[in-house]
Image (cartoon, helix red, strand yellow):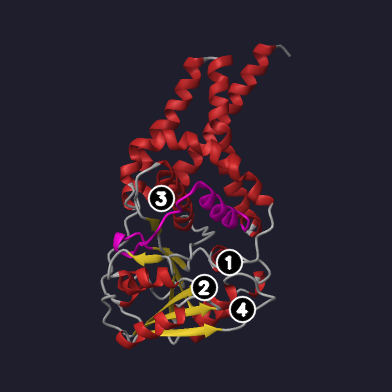
């Protein structure tokens, strides 16, 4: 076999990788691009319990908790804050808020659950404390994007629905780090929303997630993965979601907003915690996510090699096909998630994802850290 044949094979591999990428865009991601929820003929309201777990989060609670407490919701609801062994002023802050907001309830945990690391124990206590069937989860560092968050999230439920996936966005700020954080958040949501629309839900994010207590108890809470510090959101949804019991809500008034990481190191630590749970997903989900990541990672190196070593004309034609499909599908997806300002940057950030995968590849094999804060 001569060098010409070797580079020809490499070009064929590049074409195969491109076809795999096109499959994900045209089978999965297109579902979010053209998703339009059917209007409800009858609007229902359900009692809702909002649950927030906090450990030494007094500053974030002072800033964000009022957003959950001033919701315009005409039906019975409560906001439960589980104070997980905080050493700051969380207790006193909650006591002050409760004087004004009667819907606020709180639980103070004074002992660690040593055999259940991470956030799962305080969240389980919050769910068991909740008076209502529908629970709506968010974090202490998140604020609802509108006063209709509770109302519009719970409207997603019908007789078959047990899980509702929402979008947890980050505040827009200047700088490359902020763009990368927001793009990665969008890119993750692009996948889990599209997979859910395809009937193969694999995760949700605890910053904005709702489900019914009955499904929580049916699966015995987090007992199947209590030994894993993270995964109180994605691993539970990975286990409990079916083709018919999950819906998404991408109404902009249902978004939550968080402060983005301020340093590259902080963002890397955050993402390492998330990716360390992916190895526990169902086999089908691991295969689909792994194949997409591998094809995305290989695309640009193979493009460069094909341009330099084989035929730049043919390589650019293949690249252009993928680029056009990306451009058509990504814009409506970005617009739906209120991130259309990043559209002019998508090609540059997409190239940057090659380095992103390099940085976080090792986290897949790392053991999750025990502390959730």
Q: Is residue 335 above or below residue 63?
A: above
Q: Which residues are magenta?
A: 249-277
Is mark 2 in CB contact (under 8 Å) with mark 1?
yes
How packed mark 2 is, by other alpha carbons closer than 10 Å (few <14, some 14-19, many 20 or more), is some
Using the image as rendered, state which of residue 111 and residue 350 is in the foreground: 111
Which residue bears the numbered disc 4? 220
Eye-nearest disc, 3 or 4: 4
Asked whether disc 3 touches disc 1, contact meaning CB atoms under 8 Å apart, the reply is no
Quickly name the residue at label 3.
31
Where the C terminus falls, by quadrant?
Answer: bottom right
- The numbered dot on residue 372 is 1
- First-in-chain label (3 vs 4): 3
Q: Earlier in the sequence, mark 3 or mark 1?
A: 3
Q: Earlier in the sequence, mark 3 or mark 2?
A: 3
User: Height in image: 333 above or below 55?
Assistant: above
What separation in Å lies between label 3 and label 2 (alpha carbons)?
A: 38 Å
The picture quadrant where one finds residue 66 is: bottom left
- Hey, which residue is sitting farthest front in the picture? 88
Label 2 vs 4, first from the N-terminus: 2
Residue 303 percent coordinates (x, y): 53, 25
Q: Are marks 3 and 2 in contact (CB under 8 Å)?
A: no
Discs 2/4, front: 2
In the displayed structure, 149 sits above or below 12; it is: below
Q: Considering depth in this image, is 123 or 306 the residue closer to the camera?
A: 123
Mark 2 or mark 1, whichever is nearer to me: 2
Residue 226 image position (x, y, % from top left): 65, 72
């Amino acid at each position: 076999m001569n060098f010409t044949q070797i580079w020809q094979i490499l070009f064929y591999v590049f074409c195969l990788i491109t076809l795999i990428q096109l499959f994900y865009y045209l089978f999965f991601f297109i579902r979010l691009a053209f998703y339009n929820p059917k209007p409800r003929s009858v609007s229902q309201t359900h009692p809702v319990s909002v649950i927030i777990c906090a450990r030494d989060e007094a500053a974030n609670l002072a800033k964000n908790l009022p957003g959950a407490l001033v919701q315009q919701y005409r039906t019975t609801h409560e906001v439960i804050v589980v104070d997980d062994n905080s050493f700051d002023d969380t207790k006193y802050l909650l006591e002050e808020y409760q004087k004004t907001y009667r819907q606020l309830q709180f639980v103070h945990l004074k002992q660690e659950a040593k055999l259940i690391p991470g956030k799962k124990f305080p969240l389980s206590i919050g769910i068991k404390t909740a008076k209502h069937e529908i629970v709506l989860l968010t974090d202490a560092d998140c604020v609802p994007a509108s006063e209709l968050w509770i109302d519009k999230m719970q409207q997603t439920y019908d007789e078959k629905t047990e899980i509702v996936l929402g979008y947890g966005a980050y505040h827009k700020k200047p700088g490359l780090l902020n763009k990368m954080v927001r793009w990665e958040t969008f890119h993750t949501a692009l996948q889990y929303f599209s997979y859910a629309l395809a009937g193969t839900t694999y995760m949700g994010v605890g910053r904005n997630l709702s489900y019914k207590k009955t499904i929580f108890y049916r699966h015995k809470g987090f007992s199947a993965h209590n030994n894993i510090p993270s995964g109180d959101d994605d691993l539970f949804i990975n286990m409990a979601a079916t083709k018919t019991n999950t819906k998404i809500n991408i109404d902009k008034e249902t978004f939550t907003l968080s402060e983005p990481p301020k340093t590259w190191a902080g963002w890397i630590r955050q993402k390492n915690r998330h990716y360390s749970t992916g190895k526990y997903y169902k086999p089908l989900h691991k295969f689909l996510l792994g194949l997409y990541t591998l094809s995305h990672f290989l695309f640009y190196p193979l493009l460069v090699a094909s341009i330099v070593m084989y035929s730049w004309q043919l390589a650019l034609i293949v690249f252009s096909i993928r680029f056009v499909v990306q451009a058509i599908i990504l814009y409506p997806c970005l617009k739906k998630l209120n991130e259309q300002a990043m559209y002019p940057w998508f090609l540059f950030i997409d190239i940057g994802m090659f380095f992103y995968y390099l940085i976080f590849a090792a986290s897949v094999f790392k053991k999750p850290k025990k502390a959730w804060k």
